[in-house]
Image (cartoon, rainbow, N blue to C red):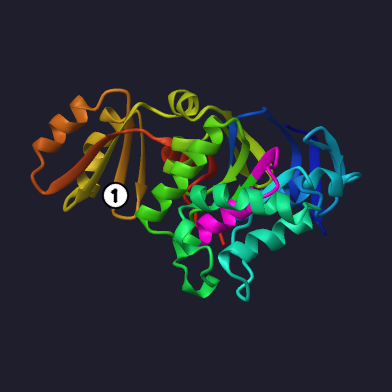
Amino acid sequence: MLRVRNLTKRYGDTEVVRGLDLDVRRGECFGLLGPNGAGKTTTLRLLLGLIEPDSGSIELAGIAVPEHAREARMKVGVVPQMDNLDPDFSVCENLLAYGRYFGMEKSAIVARVPMLLEFAGLASKADAKIAQLSGGMKRRLTLARALVHDPDILFLDEPTTGLDPQARHLIWQGLRRLIADGKTIVLTTHFMDEAERLTDRLAILDHGRLVAEGAPRALIESQIEPAVVEVFGEGLADWTQDHAPGLCQRFENVGETLFCYTPDADAIIGSLKRAPTLRYLHRPSNLEDVFLKLTGRDLRD
């Protein structure tokens, strides 16, 4: 559904996307992750033909982009990072108006509206104005709107940012249904648990380059130690100096917490039990650990 080869984009002297290669298979959910400034937004704009690359090739839904970007976008549904619903229209009218942008007959759109409202859990809100909807409802409507023309591929840009846990889970439920129905999805997110739950494969970008690609579980197993012990409390500096080098395969000090990465946490926990002023959290490694190892812990703006 998507093939990208040696994609580059510069703004002045800054190379924002650097020789990017990507393949997204039909029917999979593909994650595009990276810290702020990694090049994700520029990459999405390139893939949709909204800006032109300096070099490289893009094939979206079998169509060359940007040469035939308009034709390609007719096969694409987009959920932008910020909701851009029309506040003057009702829920139903937003769907009707959006469908006309794709050249759909009104009767075809009307026939799809009940299914889309049911999918979004908004069947009782068809005539409600946008101002009457909660943040979660608006996000679900934006997702339903992206499906009005039955696209071949969906681009979701941080679809659950700003939502409470209940709303996030409802969005996840809807996305799982789309994936089960064979839709192809490209997802950007800052929630590592979201990427781990939803994506079949993902790519991690940093400074415009691809630094890792694969299935979430495969990346965790190949890139990071199996267990993590987070240690904090009074006397941490002394314990770190005396014990961490011998007990931890790899460790990092972040603020007032020590992260110990290890294949076996038993020895670390045994030592910590003899240090009553210290507290610890023992957990399996996850995608966030991989992300931070590959992109660093420095704050990006």
Q: Foreground: 116 or 31?
A: 116
Q: Is residue 200 left or right of residue 19?
A: left
Image: 292 above or below 1: below
How far from the left and from the top, in percent, is residue 10? 81, 52
How far from the left and from the top, in percent, is residue 263? 32, 23
Image quarter in which the C terminus is found:
bottom right
Secondary structure, mark 1, is strand
Q: Is residue 24 left or right of residue 91?
A: right
Q: Is residue 114 left or right of residue 109?
A: left
Specify the farthest residue to the right. Answer: 67
At horizontal 80% and vertical 35% (from top left) the residue drawn is: 6
At horizontal 54% and vertical 43% (from top left) the residue drawn is: 295
Q: Is residue 202 left or right of residue 233?
A: right
At horizontal 44% and vertical 42% (from top left) the residue drawn is: 173
Q: Foreground: 11 or 160?
A: 160
At horizontal 70% and vertical 42% (from top left) the residue drawn is: 151
Q: Is residue 122 visible?
A: no
Q: Foreground: 246 or 216?
A: 216
Image: 43 above or below 122: above
How far from the left and from the top, in percent, is residue 76? 72, 45
Please tell me whether residue 116 belongs to the stretch shown in magenta.
no
Residue beneath label 1, please? 257
Q: Amino acid at mark 1?
A: Thr
Please tell me whether residue 141 belongs to the stretch shown in magenta.
yes
Q: Is residue 265 visible?
A: yes
Write the start and end of the magenta stretch as one range.
138-154
Q: Foreground: 79 or 67?
A: 79
| Count of all numbered marks drawn on residues in the image | 1
